[in-house]
Amino acid sequence: MICLVLGLVVGRLAIEHANEPAMNETQQSMWSALEASGDYDPGSVHLLGSRYGVDAWEVTRSNGRQQCILITRGSSLDDDDAGSPTAGCAAPEADGASPDEGDESDSIQANLAYTEDGVDYIAWANRIDDVNGDSVVLLRRNDANAGWDWRSQYTDAELELVDQLEGAGLDGETLRIIAYDGDLPVWTGFSDTGQCVAIVKDGVASHCGELTPESAPLELQVDSTVYELRVGYERGDSLTIYRGIDGAGEQE
């Protein structure tokens, strides 16, 4: 049996300094400005990636005890058109704490408001650690003047899955990806019968019911894999994947 404990996974851009993207001239200027600002540990500024003309960075504070991300636009922190980048940081780790003793309850989020071609945008990035302890980040933006369209958060491929999930009775507006099983998104959302855990693989497979911190988890078995969804007061929903389970729900 293989047991994988997964929290909410909202994107999968791996933060690996060895594979750090090459910086163009604009990004190099911003990197220099961030390093010179005095707000972050020297040498801790690393480019994660870019989208929509904005850049996501990983930085640290307090001699590496506080992990942060921020998003920027342009080449200078003093450029009025670049917006006002603000770092989102995790709680500082205690002195001498191991990586497993850090605060895992929250993802790190950073926002950036800016105007481009007369349109007001809000760009945002979320960073969490995946099951292997690798950091992943999602970078998105929304038109600040437009009404919220929940479908805009998904790619075209994900929207095809959303349509199938809605056809199976799940409320699309409540859907979100709780984790990935390899490349397979695992979804949670609500139907008329309660909260659901679901996947789309040769059709929709789902299990729905009442889910509270005191109740038994929701378990969805597909072939020899079981997706177990729990909810907690502080950490919200979490998913555990069990492999090698026989038809009776027992380990082979």
Image (tube, rainbow, N blue to C red):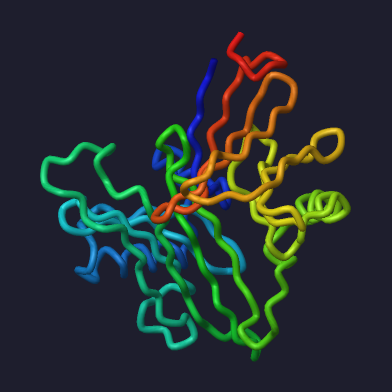
Quadrant containing the N terminus is top right
Q: Name the side, left or right, on which 97 lies relative to 123.
A: left
Q: Nearer the viewer, residue 7 or 54?
A: 7
Please identify the quarter of the rendering in which residue 67 is found: bottom left
* Residue 188 picture location, percent across and down: 65, 50
In the image, residue 248 sits, relative to residue 109, either above or below, namely above
Question: In this rendering, would 114 be left or right of 34?
Answer: right
In the displayed structure, does residue 209 sit left or right of residue 131?
right
Residue drawn at (52%, 44%) of the image: 215
Q: Quarter-wise, where is residue 217 in the image?
A: top right
Q: Is residue 86 above or below residue 42?
A: below
The residue positioned 63% from the left and 50% from the top of the image is 210
- Residue 83: x percent and y percent? 46, 82
**Horizontal and vertical percent for residue 154?**
71, 59
Residue under the image location 55 percent in, 77 percent down: 122
Q: Residue furthest left?
A: 95
